[in-house]
Amino acid sequence: MNRTNLVLSFLVLCSINFSYGQRRKKNVDEVQPVESIAQNPKLVVGIVVDQMRYDYLTRFWNQYGEGGFKRMVNEGFNAKNNHFNYAPTSTGPGHTSVYTGTTPAMHGIIGNDWYDKTIGAEVYCAGDDSYKSVGTTSKAGQMSPHRMLTSTVTDQLRLHTQQRGKVIGIALKDRGAILPAGHSANAAYWFEGKKDGNWITSSYYMDALPQWVVDFNASDAVEVYKKPWNTLRPIETYVESGTDANNYEGLQKGETTNAFPHDLPAIWEQNDQFDLIRRSPFGNSITTDFALAALEGEGLGQDNITDFLAVSFSSTDYVGHFFGVNSKEIEDTYIRLDQDLARLFSTLDEKVGEGEYTVFLTADHAAIDVPTYLIDQKIPAGYLDMDGMKSKFNEFLQYKYGTTDVVKDISNYQVFLDHKILSNLDIDLEDAQEDIAKEFLSYDGISKVYTAHQMWENEYTEGIPYILQNGYNQKRSGDVLLVTNTGYISYGTTGSTHGSPFIYDTHAPLLFFGKGIKHGSTVNRTEIPDIAPTISALLGIAFPNGATGKPIGEVLE
């Protein structure tokens, strides 16, 4: 090749490389994605349905409309294998675990009530007589979250936004409003029934009710639900539940049958007036009405700083306890709750903006079928003979130690020993725990027993002991932990209850929907403490300071 051709070839090659480089740079610039480090919904709505079993989604699916539960499943994410990973499975620990991202072992709420070893008396999870009631002259407002030892996702949102993001907690039950709202909430409101039927709060949050709450209480918003309760749809279509009149349901004062309809005005006075509404689906409707009033009155979700509305629907628990999980009443309650959810979501679409808010829905525990019903279906179940067990246990204590004073308290399926008396009697604590555990293991209805020493010395990773250990708080829990036979409860012979480490109490729904949420489902195991870290990861905020759960990666976009 001569010199002239060589120069021409070099110039052509340079031109091609320059042109390719320019095109490549331009293409890279065009397709370079902008990473979003966190979602910024205007509002997060956390919904806890008290005593909701997972199978209420599937059993009543054909009864639901398109705007409530079905909308969450069809547009959002369904965690089908979601469980509480601790016991006791009750309201106080449940709400706390959802929002702290951890278990009673860490957050300290070991029951609704428990024996406090430091003061030698029973305490209530939200009780606090250092504060005054606001909105009532009764003691119903003397509450605070001071017994909760860790922060909540709602607390972390407040810290992250320099207190500019509002947090409001709402529930018929005080503990269902206070514990989710956290330590630094703007407000928590709960319902005082009896003769007034008003929403109240504690001086922990404020000295006087805001005007929108005063106006709500002064209106007839609650009065309109003082009406007969009949099924929303023809009762013959309620084929997903048992017979209407049966021996498995409670009988309300003033009624001669436990079947529909329930004439609430006729039995009003015998059943503590507005407290009667709690034990009907109308309690959930009142909660929805008040939540929507809070949305408007507090201006939630009206700017780009994320707010948080924590709502707990408590009537599902009252109805389940009284009528049982297989009752027509529970079916009607969920059909009506579905309508309330649709009403809530529709208002959020209008006031906050569709796609501008994020919702999760779960439960604080599930529930067992009424054991008398299970027995009639030839399924192993039963009731603990607590009086007989107590008498037999006292005889054992007297024979073994010469006194019953070595035991301070028995509650929440835990035995609390008097360590000082054991020491004075020169009895080794570990030996006493083991001897008492062996004694209880010999009783009918008790299947397993564990000692505090076992909880301290071992690290369980599966099964019943894993669940018990997650519920065991070293400073607050007892010395011996009792586990019943499956299907056995300490309760009346009508209605359902909860509290055990068994799957009928641990399997609860978990739905996510809205901004930042993928559409899909999983049958991989998720656990209640995973909820708060998942919402924290979505918002890009710090996890609650005691969190032991992990974000559910499949949920987030």
Image: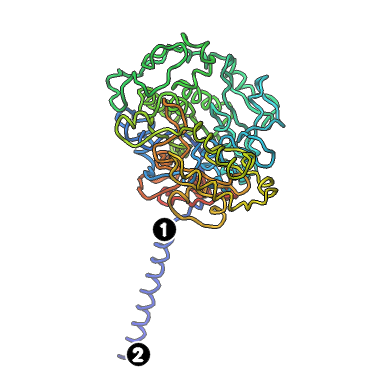
Is residue 440 left or right of 122 when viewed as pictured? left
Task: Write down the quadrant of residue 324 in the picture.
Answer: top left
Q: Which residue is mark 1?
A: 30
Label annotation for residue 534: none
Q: In terms of secondary structure, where does tag 1 sit?
A: helix
Q: Position of residue 108 (x, y in %)?
A: 60, 44
Residue 77 visible in the picture: yes
Q: Nearer the viewer, residue 306 or 6?
A: 306
431 or 145: which is nearer to us? 431
Q: How many other residues sit within 10 Å of disc 2, few (<14), some (14-19) or many (≥20)? A: few
Q: Amino acid at mark 1?
A: Glu
Q: How is the image coloured?
A: rainbow
> Farthest residue in the right direction?
130
Question: What amino acid is found at the position of numbered circle 2 in the picture?
Answer: Arg
Task: Tell me where residue 199 sits by quadrant.
Answer: top right
Residue 426 at what x, y percent from top left?
67, 51
Residue farthest toward the top in the current orientation of the protein: 266
Closer to the camera in the image, 517 or 175: 175
Q: Earlier in the sequence, mark 1 or mark 2?
A: 2
- Disc 1 crowd, CA 10 A, few/some/many (<14, 14-19, 20+): few
Using residue 27 as the reference point, say whether residue 528 is left or right of it. Answer: right
Count of picture labels: 2
Name the residue: 51% across, 12% down.
270
Q: Position of residue 54 (x, y in %)?
A: 38, 38
Q: Can you identify the residue that label 2 sits on?
A: 3
Visible residue check, residue 510: no
* Quadrant showing the N terminus: bottom left
